[in-house]
Image (spheres, rainbow, N blue to C red):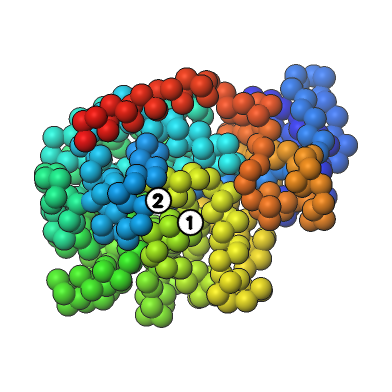
Amino acid sequence: MNYLIRNATAIHTQDTPGARDIRIRNGRITEMGRGLTPLPEQPETVIDASGCVIWPGLVNTHHHLAQSIMKGVPGGLNQGLGEWLSSVPYRFWPKVTPELMYHAARLGLYEMIRSGATTCADHHYLYHSNTSPELEDTVWQAAEELGIRLVLCRGSATETGSHEGMIEHRIEPETIDQVIDRLDATRKKHHQSGADAMKKLVVAPTSLIHSSTPEGLRIQARWAREHGLRMHSHLLEVEFDEIKAREKYRQSAIDYAEACDWLGPDVWYAHLVHSNPRAVERLAATGTGIAHCPTSNCRLGSGIAPVVDMQKAGVPVSLAVDGSASAESGSMLQELNLAWLIHRATHGPDATTLEQVLDWGTRGGANLLGLQDTGSLSVGKQADLVVYDIDQPRFAGVHSTLLAPLMCGEPVQVRDSFVQGRRIIKDGHVAGLDERELTRKVQEGVARMLAEA
């Protein structure tokens, strides 16, 4: 747990400009600077980071780990969100066993870690009236084994409503009492409070508009705040959210969310692609944040979230992969690279800066998740950091070396990675994971799932 990382080409830190070395003791950064030397009276492992740049670990604020085994499903390749949900996740949802969920979670977390992430918020929504608790337990287990911080956003649906995928595949929703009882069981078993937690629980109905009731949403919001838990959901990913909100509730989607107590600094939403100026104003005024998922939004043809306007208005911005069934790369670095580029394409070359996007992908995400002890590199903070090897041909001509991984994008080589001072990647290898075995287990599980679908 005690390390001295030396001779980095550059370190992304605002507190110690020009630093090249980092000392880690008992899971925290205790010293940063140049020319740091080993402390003989305090044994530590010395790591030479020559040819590498060091960043805070990336923070993914919205994922669906179960979808790691649903990539590139032929029937959904050219469908929009509504049809795609039925063709892909809801088609396979009832076939996901605890064993397969375990391998899916390991695969999704592996992809996160190898791209530079140290925290993952998984919007896990495989719950119905007869759900086995083992299905959720495997997600916690996978994260603990790989050493990544996990924020489990516990999804729920208490009515099928306008969720065509649930209707088509005859998925029986939970009751609101089941949701609360099961949430409470998870809270008591796993949730850790504090800005340095390794495990957090979030109350996260799968959809505000399509599979929840107003009273059920208020009950979940009240319960979450009584227990100091944050809140998360999907909203305005497609225009259909706005259409159904006005049809069902005679309100805009954002006003409906506010009427159900689902805006505030303890709330963030995935997507928010179709946010109009009124929505942006309410998000900013209430401190409600966004998990911006540019790859998935492009892949499903949903559009581009107005995060440039949101940033200017004061909306907290973070970045996220979304499920790998609609963002097949499974890479947080891909999201940073695309977020940097896509808004320039629509707003001009000064719409996004590299530094701003990296901040969205680190500090912005950590703050939204209540993990303020991470997300940046400074003395006293948790040692969540990633060491990218840029001593390679594709980076050799880059002048702005610190930001080379973001500019050049995938593929990258994470040489070392640390979470709470624990080395979860060593010399390019994810600790505790056999890549060949993982590949075989996933392939076998997918074959069985397809045979039963």
Pointers 1 and 2 in contact (CB under 8 A)?
yes
* Residue drawn at x 54%, y 72% as measured from the top left: 308
Q: Seen in the image, is 227 located left or right of residue 17?
A: left
Residue 188, percent across and down? 30, 33
Residue 390: where, in percent of width, then height?
A: 75, 42
Disc number at residue 326?
A: 2
Q: Residue placed at 18% from the left, 56% from the top?
A: 163
Task: Report the quarter where the N terminus lies.
Answer: top right
Q: Is 425 or 170 nearer to us in this picture?
A: 170
Neighbor class of circle 1 (other Cα within 10 Å; few <14, some 14-19, many 20+) is many
Question: Mark 1 = which residue?
Answer: 295
Judge by depth and name the residue closer to the eye, 330 or 292: 330
The residue lying at 88 percent from left, 37 percent from top is 35
User: Going from the N terminus, do you reach mark 1 or mark 2 first?
Assistant: 1
Q: Is residue 319 above or below residue 430?
A: below
Pick the residue in front: 388 or 167.
167
Q: Is residue 62 left or right of residue 46?
A: left
Q: Is residue 233 left or right of residue 13?
A: left
Type of amino acid under label 2:
Ser
Q: Quadrant of the C terminus?
A: top left
Residue type at the position of mark 1? Thr
- Give x and y (percent) for residue 80: 32, 61
Residues at marks 1 and 2, CA–CA distance in whole angstroms: 8 Å
